[in-house]
Image: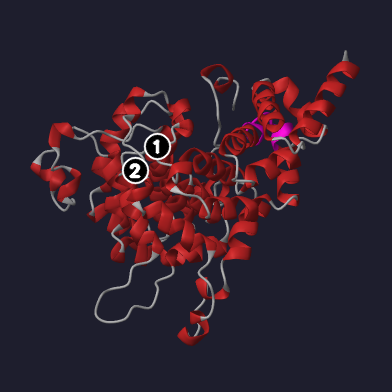
Amino acid sequence: SNQDSSSVYKDLVQFLQASRVDLKLEATKAVLQVVTDRNEVLQLIEHGVLLPLLRIASDTSDSACAENALQALLYLSSSTEQATNRCIDELLQNKAVPRLVELILGSTRSQHKQVNFALGLLANLTRTEQGALELVGKTLPDYAVKEVDEKDIEDKSRPTMELLLDRYFNLQYIIDTVDYSSHEPYEWDTLDKDPYQHFAAILMNATQLKAGRQFVMRIPRQEGDERAQSVLERLLPQLQTSNPIRRRGISGMVRNVCLETEAAWWLLNELKLASHLLYPLAGPEELDLDEKQGMDPDLWLQGPDKVREIDTATRLHLVESMLLLCASGRKSRETLRVARSYVILKYCDMTEEDEPVSERINECVQYLRRDEEGAEEGSSDRMVEEATRKRLQLALASTQVASKTAADYDDVD
């Protein structure tokens, strides 16, 4: 009966608050068994399970308890829409963002499972505007988004995003290499050999906000002759990493950055963004001399060994980035045409099985060809703008990070 289950939940919450570690451990195991049942998730949240779990997760003295609590919270933050929204609201109210950041930055290499769950949870929290603001707004000091005098900077501690970025780039934290092709896509989230992988989704979520986009595009001042690199430029090679979770998040981040139309010239000419976007979309097709003319040789040098991006969400982000660049003006489209983007997109479309990706490719191709066919000055700008404004003007949040099995993956939209 409802009354019986209600008392069970109340007991469970009490055990989670117990001072005895063995009781807490058993309680976290029990919660993990219940959270896989989507019908029970809302009940758990309503009976006040979130705060005790968050407290256990924050207590690193017992790693088994903390790990279970984090995994349970990850489940709860990626369940049914109603439960997820309730969970995220309540976690944000209970200062989950700074707690998780502290846990992650205070962790050691051996706590890689906890870090993977914690960053996955942080990715889910930052999908919302409030969560992204909590991370970006509170942890990026003013100098991350505007120029100030260097003397003012020295006495400020480094912001959280930069500290997390250091960990993300640091290969020492990667425990082992993984053959992702031997795993189903729904299993990728839970592979924990690269514990900082979900920071890519956090970067995507941070760039929903203008302050987040400015953080990744800002060029730091550099002493000496060495050319300073923006965070974005340092992250672009990640589009070719072997980890599909990293590729998906970074491609989404790039797509959000492409909303900054006034940065289009810098993106295309200084960062050579077209090559970075087209490389994952290029496949094993043999190109003739005519098609190769003007193209970055990296796009065809691998020949029949080249593998096209396997992740659908990543391909969509890449093509939408191209579309946003097309929409930024005729000069951008000229640059993309000279780079022979049309050739790569045409072959990509021939093998594309996902309809939204194929539609976006066709839109890119239409715009690039329309200019070529000598349409009146400005007409294709208007056409692109009208078509893309409705759909693409909003920044995207990452897909949910989930701790899922194949069975409950099917009913996630």
Cα–Cα gap, marks 1 and 2: 39 Å
- Above-or-below relation of 240 to 336: above
Residue extending furthest toward the right: 3
- Tell me which corner region of the image, top left, top right, bottom left or bottom right, holds residue 55: top right
Picture coordinates of residue 142, whole percent (x, y): 57, 74
The question of residue 77 being in magenta is answered with yes
Residue shown at the point (57%, 34%) measured from the top left: 64
The stretch of residues the image draws in magenta is 75-84
Q: What amino acid type should be assigned to the residue bearing mark 2?
A: Val
- Above-or-below relation of 336 to 35: below
Could one spot residue 266 in this view of the protein? yes
Horizontal side of 287 relative to 400 (left or right) equals left
Q: Tag 2 or tag 1, which sits nearer the N-term?
A: 1
Quadrant of the drawing holding the C terminus? top right
- Above-or-below relation of 287 to 59: above
Q: Residues within 10 Å of mark 2 (few under 14, many from 20)?
A: some
Quadrant of the drawing holding the N terminus? top right
Q: What amino acid type should be assigned to the residue bearing mark 1?
A: Lys
Residue at the spot of label 1? 193
Q: Nearer the viewer, residue 33 or 64?
A: 64
Residue shown at the point (90%, 18%) measured from the top left: 3
Residue at the spot of label 2? 365
Picture coordinates of residue 200, whole percent (x, y): 45, 48
Indicate the secondary structure of the residue bearing disc 1: loop
